[in-house]
Image: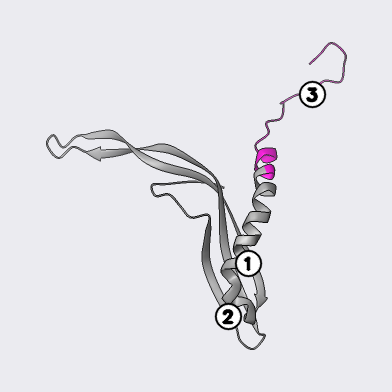
Amino acid sequence: MVITTGDKPTEIAILNVLDDIKRGKCRVRYAFRYAFKETTQTVEEVDPETGEEAPKELPAWQYEEVIDEIELPLYLKPNLESILKTLYEQSIPTLEELTTLANFELPKEISLSEGDN
């Protein structure tokens, strides 16, 4: 999923943490962000002097985001930051490759006869 935002985002965001003390488990919902690009975003802004709307270019960041969950033993919760960093470093090359494959454009028609492309 491609996201555009005004502020430079972090690579990893922890979205939710749920502790299950009975089971001794911790469920973490997180987002991995990658493929960062600096860009601009056009917004309509009202000129206070004239009251008219005018487009304005603002700096922005565009990036890919994957949201997932992990369940781990509760005793590992203090190591969560280190675990997510390791997962991120190991996963990003694969995620970037999958993004490239997903964005690959296929032809609308394919011919098997010679001389036709």
Looking at the rendered image, the disc whose residue lies closer to the viewer, 2 or 3, is 2
Position in image of residue 29 (x %, y %) = 58, 66
Q: Is residue 113 magenta?
A: yes
What residue is shown with label 3?
110
Q: Secondary structure at mark 2?
A: strand
Q: Are marks 2 and 3 in contact (CB under 8 Å)?
A: no
Q: How is the image coloured?
A: one colour
Q: What residue range appears in magenta?
A: 97-117
In the image, what residue type sits under mark 2? Answer: Asp
Residue at 72 percent of width and 26 percent of height? 107
Residue nearest the observer in this picture, 116 or 1: 1
Residue nearest the observer in this picture, 44 or 35: 35
In the image, what residue type sits under mark 1? Answer: Ile
Report the side of 112 relative to 5 (left or right). Answer: right
Q: Secondary structure at mark 1?
A: helix
Whether 37 is drawn above or below 117: the answer is: below
Q: Are marks 1 and 2 in contact (CB under 8 Å)?
A: no
For marks 3 and 1, give the CA distance: 46 Å
Position in image of residue 24 (x %, y %) = 65, 84
Quarter of the rendering containing residue 78: bottom right
In the image, what residue type sits under mark 3? Answer: Ile
Residue at 88 percent of width and 13 percent of height? 114
